Image (spheres, helix red, strand yellow):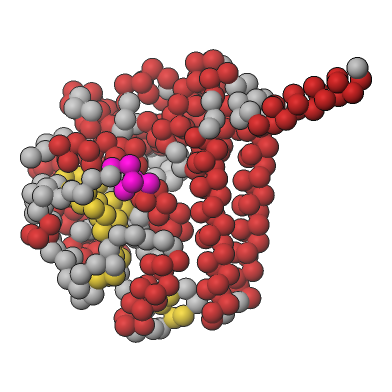
Amino acid sequence: MIRNILLVTCLLCIIVSCNPGEQGLPGIQLQKLNKMNTEAQKIKDGLKDKSGKEYLAEHDKYYALMMKRAEDALQYLHHDNPAEQTREDLQNTLDIAKIAQDGEKIIQLIKILFSRFPDTRNEKELIQTYFIYAYLLEPGEIEQYVDITIFPPEEQLYCYYMLALGFFESDDIQNAGSYFKQAENLLKEIISDKTKEHTLPLLYIVGLRSFIAFKLGDKQESFRILRDAEMEFIKEFERTTLRLYENRLNLLGRNAPDLESKKLIGGKETLNFSSLKGKVILLDFFSWDCETCNTTIPMLSNLQKEINDDDFMIIGTTRYTGSYEHDTNISEESEYEYMKNHYYKKRKVNWPVSISTTSMYNYGINATPLYILIDKRGIVRDGYFISNFLYLKKKIRLLLEES
């Protein structure tokens, strides 16, 4: 009898350990992922003592481990059922979804937390995460779940601008205009209050404001914002940034300029958009030394797989920097060889890559990663302040449906 009881107990333990929905398992999985992150950071910290081929090999180990971590997190989420999870398990699963950068799962989990545990609607970090992933997809539901007034004025400002953009993308022009007006009024209040110090990155806000005003149809206002900024920002890099913002506005709704690249990695020697009419193109502006750019490569690959349409393509676009990883002051030819024989292969990029400083300037790129969408007619349709992969997927599918 005792033997049978022990056997049944062992079988139950096995069943529990194999059931991804049981309490505690998300926490165990999260521990494994956190351990991988610790191991990866140790490799990264050790790079300062490495050079040459040894440096590249160790750096490759770091990225391989970080990408495997994201893949393992995503794999777990495919088998996870949050419907009956405890609050602790839901929050652990949310942390796993963040590692996987699975926006759809993140939104789902946070809304479950909001619904089942109403006090979570007061958790600032949770609200911020939901806002980041949801403002372009469901701005109306953000109004339902999020009380923006709980944030300090500078954070409220960003919320208002982002909601203006979100409602515009949802074709709710009235709400878009209303939130843009609220943002503009709040910006004036913050700047005019000389009794308080503010930490607003005003140059960035100039670009955001001009972009949203342009999308809302007030092109005159969008360029006026840039002209006024020229009176305030007098440093050379600031003036350059303003010119890049202007380049962006001059491109929206117009023919995409060809990528001025002498050589193309993973494709034909030259690339022009006139020969790509009929295709929807996502330009991925990146830099080899941009950590975010590198960690989003799997997301671009997944986007490519999910769209799964011959009329959609990704083109990576970067510039020569005169260096690569541990090597500095190298020629364009040497940097090209590094990008072709190391970066392209080791980072598992499976779309063509163009290298051209001129193209970065023409498209108004002042930071990476940054994405531009080009429609079947070769017209620049969207991008710049839109980096939400869920939204990009939605927008790409809409552009593919156009004739």
Residue 72 image-quadrant placement: top right
Residue at screen point 45% across, 54% down? 295
| Residue positioned most to the right | 2
Residue 320 image-quadrant placement: bottom left
Residue 119: tell me if it is visible: no
Total labels: the figure holds 0
Asked if residue 63 lies left or right of residue 227, the reply is: right
Asked if residue 381 lies left or right of residue 49, the reply is: left
Q: Which residues are magenta?
A: 302-307
Residue at screen point 33% across, 42% down? 306
Q: Position of residue 97 (x, y in %)?
A: 51, 37
Is 133 in the magenta?
no
Is 306 in the magenta?
yes
Q: Position of residue 338 (x, y in %)?
A: 39, 76
Instruction: Name the quarter where the C terminus is drawn.
Output: top left
> Most prominent secondary structure in the magenta stretch?
helix
Residue at screen point 52% across, 60% down? 63
